Image (cartoon, helix red, strand yellow):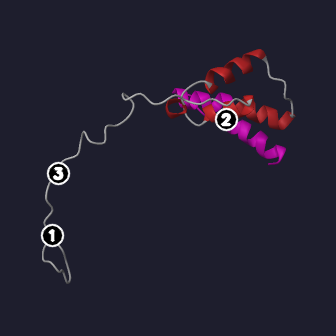
Amino acid sequence: MANKAYVAADTLLNYFVDTNNIEYNFKRVYRIYIKLKIYGDTSLTETELDELNAIAYENPLIYGKAVFVARNILRLEIHDGALSSARLMNPNKYTKEGKLLIYPNPAREYVK
């Protein structure tokens, strides 16, 4: 991607309103990523490192795709723990057995 595109992307980030954690993470991580790509500067400030580390150790299912980008920038390999049962949908909880009657069988033009 050309530097012009990174500058345009950086400008677009100004229009993001970070009203939740996913948007905040997206804006912070991609702003740092763009800075690295435009300037080729691999030295991050202590504040940027702290932000990236904080985001990298969050759960990506809750805090979004930027978690993976932060891990990539920091070259971290983090194995997220098993999901707790509180966050998993119980697939058997809402099942209801019933019968399905379709007629006429065999159908020619329509089925009720």
Instruction: Look at the picture and state if 2 lies above or below 72.
Output: below
Side of 76 where 3 appears, left or right:
right
Question: In which quadrant of the rendered image does the C terminus lie?
Answer: bottom left
Residue matched to label 2: 69
Q: 16 or 99: nearer the eye?
A: 99
In the structure shown, which secondary structural element does the residue marked by tag 2 occupy?
helix
Q: Residue furthest right?
A: 40
Mark nearer the N terminus (1 vs 3): 3
The residue under label 1 is which amino acid type? Answer: Ile
Q: Residues within 10 Å of mark 3 (few under 14, many from 20)?
A: few
Residue matched to label 1: 102
Instruction: Please report the residue visible at 71 percent of the width from the left and 34 percent of the height from the top.
Output: 72
CA distance for labels 1 and 3: 16 Å
Quarter of image, res 68 = top right
Secondary structure, magenta segment, majority class: helix
Q: Residue 53, percent across and down?
A: 67, 21
- Is residue 51 visible from the viewing direction of this image? yes
The residue under label 3 is which amino acid type? Answer: Glu
Instruction: Please report the residue visible at 20 percent of the width from the left and 84 percent of the height from the top.
Output: 108
The residue under label 2 is which amino acid type? Answer: Val
Q: Residue 62, percent across and down?
A: 49, 30
Residue matched to label 3: 97
Query: Residues in magenta?
Result: 1-29
Closer to the eye: label 1 or 3: 3
Quarter of image, res 89 = top left
In the structure shown, which secondary structural element does the residue marked by tag 3 occupy?
loop
Q: Residue 91, percent across and down?
A: 31, 42
Mark nearer the N terminus (1 vs 2): 2
CA distance for labels 2 and 3: 43 Å
Q: Residue furthest top?
A: 46
Q: Residue 17, percent across and down?
A: 57, 30
Asked if the magenta segment contains residue 4, the reply would be yes
